[in-house]
Image (spheres, grey):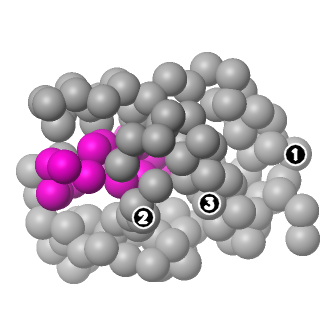
Amino acid sequence: MEMHSTLEKWLAELEEETLILASDEINEEARCNMVSFGFNEDLLQEWGKESMNKFIRGCADLYRNKSGGLNMVFYSWLDEQAGQIRISAVSQKHGKLPFGCKLKLSGLTQVVDGIFSNNSGVYTKGALDVWSQNI
């Protein structure tokens, strides 16, 4: 299955606009490298889970290519309150992700399932589902 055309367009725009920042301050780094994607129920049904999975993996690959050889951690999660899929990257040297809540490092399939069920894990399991990988 190919990635949905809207998601392909978003990836192409991300390619053009993304600059990866490295900083000694993890929160600055996370904020500068974060991108949010809004969606609604109709779009999710049109895109499908497999296409969403490919899109987020494509974002990780793009961040790897844009990181200029820096050792970074790419991560993605659902911001349930904002209704957004979010991605970012921080330097591996920080040894953690920049969240103030409890995290559950999850597989990408679990994060995508959460996007489709509007369940980030924060309110139902007490920990935010986050998919991450070293890039």
Q: How many marks?
A: 3
Quadrant housing the N terminus: bottom right
In the picture of the structure, the residue carrying the numbered disc 1 is 5
Query: Disc 2 on helix, strand or loop?
Result: strand
User: Between 114 and 77, which is closer to the camera in this rendering?
Assistant: 77
In the picture of the structure, the residue carrying the numbered disc 2 is 133
Return the x and y of residue 74 as percentages of the image width and height.
42, 52
Q: CA distance from mark 1 to mark 2?
A: 25 Å
Labelled pair 3, 2 in contact (Cβ < 8 Å):
no
User: Between 116 and 32, which is closer to the camera in this rendering?
Assistant: 32
Labelled pair 1, 3 in contact (Cβ < 8 Å):
no
Residue at figure coordinates x 65%, y 66% from the top left: 53
Compared with 47, 32 (above or below) is above
Return the x and y of residue 14 as percentages of the image width and height.
64, 31
In the picture of the structure, the residue carrying the numbered disc 3 is 57
Asked whether residue 14 appears in the rendered view, the answer is: yes
Label 3 neighbour load within 10 Å: few <14, some 14-19, many 20+ = some
Q: CA distance from mark 1 to mark 3?
A: 16 Å
**Residue type at the position of mark 2:** Gln
Return the x and y of residue 115 as percentages of the image width and height.
51, 63
Query: Disc 3 on helix, strand or loop?
Result: helix
Q: In the image, 97: left or right of 40?
A: left
Closer to the observer: label 1 or label 3?
3
